[in-house]
Amino acid sequence: MTLVEQSYTVGPITVDLMAKAISNGMSRQSKRMSEQEAYDIAFHVLNFFGYSRYVIDNMLEPEDRDAFYMLEDLGILDTEREETTLFDGREWRIHYWLIRPENVRKLAYNNGMKSEDPISSESMIYDGLPDDVWKMKI
């Protein structure tokens, strides 16, 4: 049994579990997201997956894909592709999005921090910067 199969035997990825993972993952990156926003994103994304572990990328709209990329940055989703040769000799690629349930649980239950991952003193400099520093000026 693979790690992914083992993690699914622990139980399903619920909307609440996914929302907690999203919220904790965003706070780990020093970004703020309300519980309701995290819940809405979790609900929206999990509706694509249903009872499956993967989604074909072609069915996503650009706004949906942006949410998937954000969750990929958090380690919650991953991408995979499959290539096949068509009858006329052309290559065809299918791109998939996969849920990483072990990472969802890790982020949801222990805020995604490993005990061996100390916060470096170099990254602490960013904690003192005001929010307006991060806004892009055009």
Image (spheres, rainbow, N blue to C red):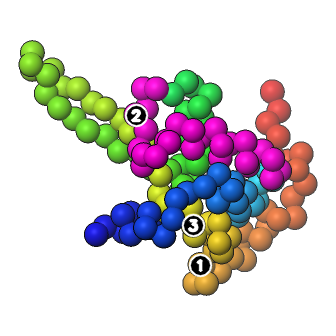
Residue under the image location 66 percent in, 74 percent down: 110
**Mark 2 or 1, closer to the camera:** 2
Query: Separation of disc 2 and disc 1 at Cα?
Result: 31 Å
CB of mark 2 within 8 Å of CB of mark 1?
Answer: no
- Magenta segment, principal secondary structure? helix
- Which amino acid is tagged 2? Ile
Which residue position is annotated with label 1? 114
**Dot 1 crowding, Cα within 10 Å, few <14, some 14–19, many 20+:** few
Q: Position of residue 135 (x, y in %)?
A: 82, 40
Label 3, on which residue?
A: 105
Q: Is residue 57 magenta?
A: yes
Asked whether residue 85 is in view, the answer is yes
Image point 43% across, 32% down: which residue?
57
Magenta span includes 35 = yes
> Looking at the image, is mark 3 or mark 1 nearer the viewer?
3
Q: Which stretch did the figure color magenta?
A: 34-59
Q: Where, quadrant-wise, is the C terminus in this rendering? A: top right
The tag earlier along the polypeptide, 3 or 1, is: 3
* Label ID, residue 56: 2
- Classify residue 18 by image quadrant: bottom right
